[in-house]
Image: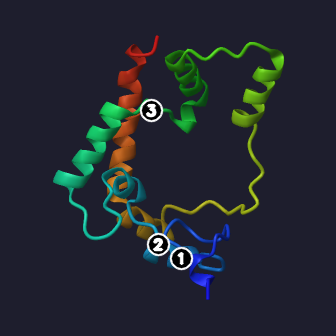
Amino acid sequence: SSSSSSSSSSSNSVGINIQGMSLEDFASNVSENWMVRSLTNTMTGPLTRDHHLALAKEILRTKFLIGLLEEKTESLRRIEAYFGWRLPSRVSQTCKNNMFYFEPQSKNAHDPIEPTSKEYKILRERNLFDLELYDYAKGLFEEQKSLVG
């Protein structure tokens, strides 16, 4: 049977079928510091602050131009400046605006998670290193301001 290799949109990157899974089950069984794990190529096993988180921060610092969704306009300006991109026509500008500035209509809309909920607490606890990495990335975003005029 090929059901374990499904390419369905309801499977995640490790092949677990998440369709119909509750948020609590997802938080408890699937989501755990995905960004730190991806950057350090440590998809299984325990993570440590001194090795894995420190390495992920160093990789971000030395290999990435940081963009932030909450700073979308500035992020796009920096990317365009860094790569020397020029959008020569109105069509190009319209395409960029449609891609980046209009809110996409999600096929899987979800209600916000309350910070006091069980699911939120589980997600936070299981993703502490990713949250620290995100805070670090926000600092890098500010530092990189001087790199991309």
**Farthest front residue?**
1
**Farthest right residue?**
91
Q: Which of 115 and 30 is in front in this view?
A: 30
Q: In this view, does 38 lie above or below 89?
A: below
**Farthest bottom residue?**
1
Q: Do the residues labelled 3 and 1 touch (CB within 8 Å)?
A: no
Local SS, label 3: loop
Q: Please tell me the numbered disc located at residue 56.
A: none
Local SS, label 2: loop
Residue 117 visible to an observer of this rendering: no
Q: Which amino acid does label 3 sit on?
A: Ile
| Left or right, residue 26 beside residue 147 | right
* Image coords of residue 21 (percent x, y): 60, 79
Q: Mark 1 = which residue?
A: 16
Crowd tier of the residue under label 2, counting other residues whose Cα lies within 10 Å: few below 14, some 14–19, many 20 or above? some
Crowd tier of the residue under label 1, counting other residues whose Cα lies within 10 Å: few below 14, some 14–19, many 20 or above? some
Q: Distance between the residues labelled 3 and 1?
A: 30 Å
Q: Mark 3 = which residue?
A: 66
Measuring 37% from the left and 42% from the top, which residue is drawn there? 135
Measuring 31% from the left and 61% from the top, which residue is drawn there? 42
Q: How far apart are marks 1 and 2 (CA)?
A: 8 Å
Measuring 25% from the left and 68% from the top, which residue is drawn there? 46
